[in-house]
Image (spheres, rainbow, N blue to C red):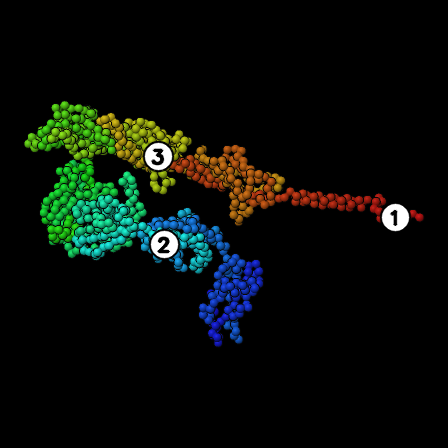
Amino acid sequence: SCNVSGLPPLPDGRNDFEFRVKKPANPNSELNIISSESENFPYSVYRGRVRSGDISVKHVNPNSVVFTILSLQKADEGEYECSVINTRASFYGTYTAMTTVKVIDNSLSISSSAPASLAQTEGDSLELTCEASSNTIQHTHLSFGFFLRGNGENAIHPVISMDRDFVLIPGQDFAERYKAGLIRLDKIGEVTYRLKMSHLKLSDQGAVYCEAKEWIQDPDQTWYSIATKTATETKVLLDSASLLVTVAVPQSTLQEGQRLSVSCAVESQNLKQKFFSLAWLRGGVELARVGPTGVLTVGPDYSSREREGELRAARIGDRDYSLILQPVRTSDQGEFVCRAWPEERTSIGDFIQGAAQDSKPHTVTISATESGLSVEMLNSVRVNEGGTLELSCRVSGVTGHLSVTWQRKSNSPSASFSSLVSLNRDGIMAKAEGSVDVRVKALRPASDLFTLELEEATQAAAGFYQCVVSEWKTTNNKASSLEATSEVVVTPLVCMETDIRVELICRIKRLKLPRTLIWSVRRGSTTPDSILTLYSNGAISWSGDQQQYQLKIENKNQQDEMWYHLIISSASKKDAGNYKCSVSVVLDKAPRKLHSSELAVSVDSPVSDLTLTSTPSIKANINADVELKCSVSSNNPVLSRYAVTWLLLDIINTTGGHKMIVNSDQDAIVTFGPDVEVNQRQRLSVSRAKGPEFVLSIRNTRSSDKGVYSCEVVQWQQDPSGEWHQLPPVSKSTQLTVTEPESNLFIQNSNTEFNISTSQSLTVPCNIIKQSSPLSQFQITWFWQKDSNTERRPLFTAYRNSTLQYWFGKSDEQLRFGHPLPNHFSVTIVMPSPADSGVYFCEVEEWAPSLSNGWRQVAVRRSGYLTASVYAEAFFGVTVLSLLVILLLVLRMCRGNSSAKKPETSLWTESHQLNPKD
């Protein structure tokens, strides 16, 4: 747009504008493009585009116009000028404005791999893939989308798109299906986009295509679309589905305790000759399903309510299905859907399920009644294995009769609640169908309290328990139901230490018949192993280690019980497991086998009373020998073996970890840490003394050896079965401080000056006079600078590992490294040029070996300065030649002066006249 302000109004009320351009190829020449005043203004190169409307100018208001180029070309690049035509007698300011237009190459490409047409069936899924990319060098973003033009429509409906910031935006007509997860747009890799549409509708028929737009950001942070491309359309043809499902809810707004009825109907051709499965879903979760033969299956969330009679579902006609929930709870509200599947019956009677068809959703709202009933339980309860589990469920706000159902589910994520026992409103207890567990009871000790008792709790009793309390207004009218949940943890029997006597008791009540008793143990997930068998005639058959086990029998006549004691004389690790006794009897001429609950026995290693003693801190001079001692004491009289590990605080590791130096295991086998170099191991040794006492010796101590050393001792003890077991480690630390002298690195430090020709070589020595350690290694770098005011530049570096590096564009033909003697180094510049004149020096880094860090830098020293002046050989020769010529002339002049003093006849030609011949 181009705007003008500050001009007096014209009689016709409108200012006219002209647009021109200067091309980069000819910046001094202007080309007329368009004018709002005259049609003859454009040059011929633009006249055709103006007439076709590709280039236009339109007034927005009397003082503003919009200049538009619909199809921008690369040749349109240049500097554009907008001018307002001044028809007034006076000038009021600036009448032109300039802007530069850069035209980016259109490298946007898009393609579709889908066929020209696709035939689908209503309810099927559709998947289309497109590729879009741009190769412009500018920083651009792409937006992408799929669009639908319905049959017989001109309107375009966006299906789903991804904007330039990768945000997914569903079209208005497809938003609900997108929220339901039926429409997806995925970007796969850099250029591929995939559309997935599930459960196609007849309204999805039409031409589907993908479109990409390329965006660029102007300096004002505004994004503009610079290119748009569309891929080939795909014609989607849909056949009407052969199955239609509807849902009906007579009453959608209910109060808790009322009856909810959800009816479903299926429509299809030849309905009576077909089979269907139909399911009710609430919030996408299946409540119940009626199969093709009319068999009802209920989801895990409603299985207990179906058993209680609160849920009923059935097929009530050729096309009609009914679900009834009574009494309803507030948790039953939500969006209900009927889903049907056609079922094709095979020749052998099986069914093959077809594509599902859903009804439209129907929302049901359930409000809480005015009942003040509330139910509370403890969040979690712990019980020892073999003990009695007791759960309490307290109620309040009761106005009617109450009943309670106790339910349980295991800790498995896929488990669901199942009924254990119930107590109806008349106080009659009923166990769950098929349950023969005599240990479970449901009680109501007070009007506001329900309890569940489970005797001799086993590990299988662990899980989540739920008490469901229902309030009844009349005999057949359940007003409301509430539940509370508690987690139960069963703690196994634990034998704290090895070598402890363990006694397990198997109690048999009121059983006078001859019996066979078996003690068994199950270790891990394996099948049980028999320990002993006691036959009815008193004979004992041992299957296990008879020396390890004992059997004792007690007759408790007063209690009408027999006690069978299994005694483990000295428990060890291998005795851990789940123990059980089984009794075989003959009842009513049929063999019966009764099992006790499993009792878990775990055997822990004894608690270590190991104590360590060490010197908190040690100071040593460098190169001295140091001993770090770690003394062990224990009150346990059992024969022990020890493994010791010496650790050093890793000062490089910022997480504060420790690095292993050396380990001596319980068999006295010594192993060095992986980070300790071979040459370092020669200085280290470990030994054991009486006590026991463990010693780490460090010879020729270095400053790098300082730090915090940890002595970690592991005690090994032998259990009664002869196996060795490891006890928890105990550690003690010692701070080692190494006093080191100042660095003794000295470099030859004399300053010298040289004048040298280009035909000679320039050698820069670097001699180390003294070093801090005989094991030191050196890194030497030679530098050059033009003068003292310029920056120094590296020429050559000799690293500690003998690697050589040339700097400043020098090569091995120009620079030669020398190492003629120990600690004597040099660099020679072969055939230097005058440009090599300047100041030379070397810098030496001294590195010493370190136990903790590998190598460490000890000192850095710089040599003296060598100032070199390099002159050209040719210039020197000209100078010498000039001096020789001058010397000869002087000698000649001296000889002339001496001959003038003699009286003889002169030899000069002027003294002898020649007579011409006649």
- Quadrant in the rendering for residue 152: bottom left
- Up the image or down, 244 lies above or below 613; here it is below
Question: Which is more foreground, mark 1 or mark 3?
Answer: 3
Residue ID at (12%, 29%): 589
Q: Residues within 10 Å of mark 2 (few under 14, many from 20)?
A: some
Task: Give the mark, 3 or 2, whose residue is nearer the N terminus.
Answer: 2
Q: Which residue is mark 2?
A: 204
- Up the image or down, 168 lies above or below 87; here it is above
Mark 2 is on which residue type?
A: Asp
Mark 3 is on which residue type?
A: Met
Q: Which residue is mark 1?
A: 913
Please tell me whether mark 3 sits on a helix, a strand or a loop: strand
Q: Residues within 10 Å of mark 1 (few under 14, many from 20)?
A: few
Mark 1 is on which residue type?
A: Gln
Q: Are marks 1 and 3 in contact (CB under 8 Å)?
A: no
| Image position, residue 445 (x, y; %) | 10, 45
| Image position, residue 3 (x, y; %) | 47, 68
- Up the image or down, 694 lies above or below 252; here it is above
Q: Which residue is mark 3?
A: 660
Please tell me whether mark 1 sits on a helix, a strand or a loop: loop
Please tell me whether mark 2 sits on a helix, a strand or a loop: helix
